[in-house]
Amino acid sequence: MSVSSPARVRLVDVGPRDGLQNEPGSIDIATKVALIERLGDAGLSAIEAASFVSPRWVPQMAGSGEVMRALRRRPGVSYGALTPNMQGFEAARAAGVDEVAVFAAATETFSRKNINCSIAESLERFRPVVEAAREHGLRCRGYISCVLGCPYEGAVDPRAVAALAATLYEMGCYEICLGDTVGVGTPAATLRVFEACAQKVPVDRLAGHFHDTWGMAIANIHAALGFGIATFDASVAGLGGCPYSPGASGNVATEDVVYLLDGLGVETGVDLDALVDCAAWISGVLGRAPQSRVARARLAQRSREEQRT
Ligand code: HMG
Ligand code: MG
């Protein structure tokens, strides 16, 4: 297979969903809406805005319908949401999402902890969601969690991930997003899992979703880029984590990915300064400094510049 880095990358900011779902406190609707709008204003064309899951399981995502309805939508931006079953799909559709996502896991234990069913049962729940999405003209993404390691089962065989990727793709998911939920992956392991999945799913239908627990997310994205992967998830200010993945930190920060891609001359359509402003704002609302190295460095640089003038 010939392999080259893409000229343009599609970034999906999952901060409003993956980021906020793990916050200890509850976040009001107006803050969620403002975050999504600021991300659109910064140039993100795909934003995972909501999650239609059980509020008993993830209380922070309650009110997702209200968030979707209150949004000032920017033309050209796709607003997506997680939909684990038909109940979630119907709520997401009623709220006017542009795309939905089903989420499977590469290991049985994570599947049970996260969505209360086996992998096989989850696929049977997803099938009608994917079909209903197609009927209603909505795209459906398929996530696979724990592709580089599981918090409960440890190492994961790339062949098991590839088999699941093939099933979700054949079911009708337009894109298969490989999640390093725990954030333990390294570039070599990242390449192994993408290589295995590319045997079954076209490379341009694969995406990467890296948590940054062990600090390797940017290196993993660089490796995946070299393999031709052109869609990555990231979270403004490095917000996030999964409530059912103990010890995992936030997603790779969108600012860090944009800085990497700007430096490589890869287009994203995102304005780094506007994104840094958004990272500083949401971190302030949540009562902390941005997690991202790039946001911190840029903010420090700005304050030095201000002191000089
Ligand atoms: P369950 O308890 O097995 O569901 O949960 P059930 O079908 O037996 O229904 C039980 C109750 O839940 C019923 O209410 C349903 O109405 C309600 P009751 O009659 O008892 O009052 N219910 C719902 N309510 C709202 N929305 C729904 C829904 N479905 C049922 N869609 C379920 C199964 C899947 C619902 C639950 O386990 C769940 O919501 N899990 C979500 C977990 C989650 O959101 N995890 C984080 C996202 S995944 C992630 O972060 C990884 C990712 O980022 C990639 C990566 O990093 O790898 C994507
Ligand atoms: Mg995640």
Image (tube, grey):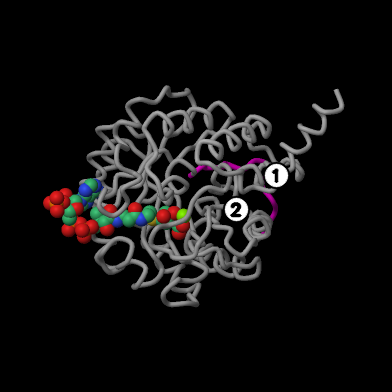
Question: What segment is highlighted magenta in the picture?
Answer: 2-14
Name the foreground residue: 11 vs 272. 272
The residue located at (25%, 66%) in the rendering is: 117
What quarter of the picture does the C terminus occupy? top right
Instruction: Determine the residue located farthest toward the right in the rendered image.
Output: 308
Hey, which quadrant is residue 106 in on the image? bottom left
Residue 294 tag number: 1
Residue 171 vs residue 20: left or right?
A: left
Q: Residues within 10 Å of mark 1 (few under 14, many from 20)?
A: many
Question: Circle 2 is placed at which residue position?
Answer: 229
Residue at the image position 66 percent from the left and 42 percent from the top = 258
Q: Nearer the viewer, mark 2 or mark 1?
A: 1
Q: Amino acid at mark 1?
A: Val
Pick the front one: 37 or 30: 30
| Main SS, magenta residues | loop
Q: In screen coordinates, is 77 left or right of 281? A: left
Residue type beneath disc 2: Ile
- Does residue 54 show up? yes
